Image (cartoon, rainbow, N blue to C red):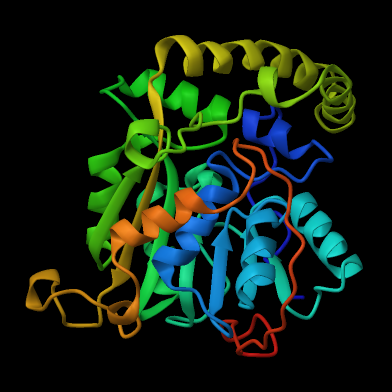
Amino acid sequence: MPRNPPGTDGSDSAVPSMLDLVRLSPRLLFPPGGVDLYRHIALLADMSEGDEVLVVACGKGVTLEYFVREHNVHGSGVDVDPHMVALAEERTREEGLGGRLQFQTGRSDSLPYRDGIFDVAVGELGLAAQADPAEAVRELVRVTRPDGVVVLVQLAWKKPVDEARRHVLSRQLGAHPLMAVEWKRLLRSAGVGGIFTQDWSDEETVGVGAKPFFDLTEIFSIPEKVDVLRRAWGRWGLRGVRTMLARTGEVHRLLTRERLLRLDLLKGRKLPVGETEGARAFVGPREAESPALPELEKATKEAKVPAGPSRELDEKHGQTAGLPLFRDGTGDGG
């Protein structure tokens, strides 16, 4: 499996972020929004058998595995942390999914794929943790085919926050929140049209309401917290453990008292070269046959799945085939 050269993954850090700590858990956790959100994404993107689906900042590959099992797509995942990529590869291989999923170590602002090959490209919470958000979004759009679907699942500030505090909180979280209007601007600048947005931390909007980020004080039991502490000690030493204890409290306050953050879903389609958003009603080749948005929302709400932000993987079945994906010089497809 081709990888970025050593030293270019950008994952070295003396102090873990909260997202790093969540990833240390042996539990296979869906990101905030849970399986409800990712079922909704699949409906909005009209995923179908044989589609090429990319997830960037994929972690252990939980959401990508869900798409593969549930919708028979061919999945590709990228993460800046080689440890997460190794875990994802080992786990999916043991479950007999190795031929239907592939994972790469790489930066989100330098994806190791050819232009225009994915039907759906999803940028997870860690998309811009160690990269400029504009560059990361441009790369996500670059590797999406014309009329393909681009999805962001990102933190957004509910109100303006000064730049210094933005920087500190972003580093602590392991994500890069922006105002919703800023995320939309980045998508439009990269060539995405027909942008749809939804606040998944607002129960009145989606009927599911979830905290916008992982709250370790709620999702982990005491034995699980001890296990994460032990793993943090082994990877980051005493400083990592102290940081974990301090940041757990800080993030809990951020989510429950200040409530500065929300979880936004943004979805659009990559405009073909030379086309502007106002040139035609922006409907992709399959979207015209898809159910209307109210029906999608109804289907999502009526789906019989457990509620909550940290569901474990459903067991489904499927089979797919992939495409030559990689840039010249990075793999067999080059």
195 lies left or right of 22:
left
Position of the C terminus by quadrant: bottom right
Provide residue 150's location: percent of width, then percent of height. Answer: 39, 65
Residue 212 in view here: yes
Residue 105 in view here: no
Provide residue 302's location: percent of width, then percent of height. Answer: 49, 51
The one nearer the camera, 104 or 34, is 34
Among the 4 quarters of the image, the one containing residue 85:
bottom right
- Residue at 31% x, 21% y is 161
Q: Is residue 179 above or below residue 7?
A: above
- Residue at 61% x, 89% y is 324
Among the 4 quarters of the image, the one containing residue 262:
top left
237 lies left or right of 103:
right
Provide residue 14's location: percent of width, then percent of height. Answer: 71, 29
Could you tell me how many numbered marks the image carries?
Answer: 0
222 lies left or right of 7:
right
- Residue at 16% x, 80% y is 275
51 lies left or right of 132:
right
Q: Is residue 36 above or below residue 17?
A: below
Q: Is residue 175 above or below residue 52?
A: above
The one nearer the camera, 185 or 134, is 185
Position of the N terminus by quadrant: bottom right
Provide residue 191's location: percent of width, then percent of height. Answer: 25, 68
